[in-house]
């Protein structure tokens, strides 16, 4: 029996027992997509083991229902490492997602761009990541399952389907490498120069621990960033959480088109 059996029966009691196909984790400013789901919203505060910390711009509900004819579980809020220092804070939600029947998770996030051809308002499909934080959500995991291979962690077939969906919707979607920086302070210009040299295209404070956990749990993973600013030192644009929240909706509109098309064509 799953160690989350009580949690699963609570969720199934409210949202029904039909298996979920896919999970969506919504990043800063993307929370409205949860409202588009025809289903049931369960506040994280009703779900033991779910993160209770909140970051403004997130909407901490688990919404289960149909989006474009696909049964999805939408995580309206995520826990970031910088909130309580726990890189495994999303482990229970991802275990629950798998136990509800899903085989795929798509994470979304707000990120700073290090590529002039990827300005504010663009979206980027992650091809790979650089764990610049050095942290790992599997530290302390006692079994050999902790040695998770991370080649093709961003599932090539899902990436191809997302790319096809973007093309079909005539949405320009870049491809690139995301660097995870712990936050909550933003990066210095020197750090941005360093991670650019290491090969990163965008930088943000989330997603990487979730993708590591997803691979550990046997879920296929993909992720898309909405670019809310040029990274520190790359332009005169303001860098602040207010700016992130204000700019996220520009990319979010494109992201929503791509995700809806992807789900319709699934
Ligand atoms: N750095 C880190 N995280 C971010 C940024 C950034 O520039 N923009 C949005 N999230």
Image (spheres, rainbow, N blue to C red):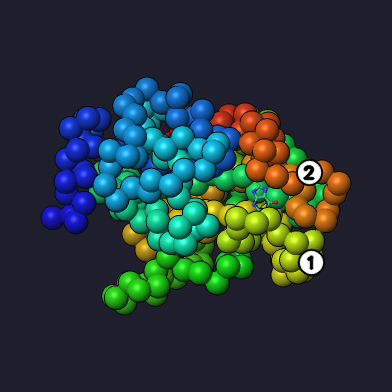
Instruction: Name the residue located 58 percent from the left edge and 61 percent from the top edge.
Output: 182
Q: How much space separates mark 2 and mark 1, taking CA atoms?
A: 17 Å
Q: Which residue is mark 1?
A: 190
* Residue 155 visible: no
Q: Are marks 2 and 1 in contact (CB under 8 Å)?
A: no
**SS at mark 1 in the image:** helix
Q: Position of residue 139 (x, y in %)?
A: 40, 72
Q: Position of residue 230 (x, y in %)?
A: 77, 48
Q: Residues within 10 Å of mark 1 (few under 14, many from 20)?
A: few
Residue closer to the observer: 67 or 245: 245
- Image quarter hosting the N terminus: bottom left
Q: Which residue is mark 2?
A: 238
Residue lying at the far right in this picture: please name it.
236
Residue lying at the far left in this picture: please name it.
1
Instruction: Name the residue located 33 percent from the left edge and 25 percent from the top edge.
Output: 39
Q: Earlier in the sequence, mark 2 or mark 1?
A: 1
Q: How many marks?
A: 2
Q: Position of residue 174 (x, y in %)?
A: 69, 46
Q: Residues within 10 Å of mark 2 (few under 14, many from 20)?
A: few
Q: Position of residue 241 (x, y in %)?
A: 65, 43
Left or right, 19 with reference to 226: left
Disc assigned to residue 239: none
Residue closer to the observer: 66 or 251: 251
């Amino acid at each position: 029996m799953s160690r989350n059996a009580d949690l699963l029966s609570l969720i199934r009691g409210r949202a029904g027992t039909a298996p979920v196909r896919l999970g969506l984790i919504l990043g800063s400013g993307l929370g409205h997509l949860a409202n588009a789901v025809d289903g049931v919203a369960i506040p994280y505060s009703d779900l033991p083991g779910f993160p209770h910390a909140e970051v403004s711009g997130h909407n901490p509900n688990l919404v289960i229902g149909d989006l474009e004819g696909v049964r999805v579980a939408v995580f309206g809020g995520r826990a970031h490492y910088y909130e309580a220092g726990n890189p495994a804070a999303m482990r229970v939600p991802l275990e629950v997602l798998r136990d509800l029947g899903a085989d795929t998770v798509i994470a979304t996030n707000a990120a700073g761009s290090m590529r002039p051809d990827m300005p504010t308002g663009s979206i980027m499909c992650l091809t790979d990541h650089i764990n610049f934080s050095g942290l790992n959500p599997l530290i302390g995991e006692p079994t050999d399952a902790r040695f998770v291979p991370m080649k093709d962690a961003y599932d090539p077939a899902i990436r191809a389907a997302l790319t096809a969906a973007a093309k079909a919707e005539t949405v320009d979607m870049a491809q690139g490498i995301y660097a995870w920086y712990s936050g909550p302070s933003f990066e210095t210009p020197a750090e941005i120069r360093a991670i650019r040299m290491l090969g990163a295209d965008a930088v943000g404070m989330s997603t990487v621990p979730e993708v590591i956990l997803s691979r550990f749990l046997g879920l296929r993973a993909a992720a898309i960033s909405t670019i809310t600013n040029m990274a520190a030192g790359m332009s005169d644009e303001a860098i602040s959480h207010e700016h992130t929240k204000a700019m996220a909706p520009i990319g979010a509109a494109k992201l929503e088109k791509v995700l809806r098309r992807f789900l319709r064509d699934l």
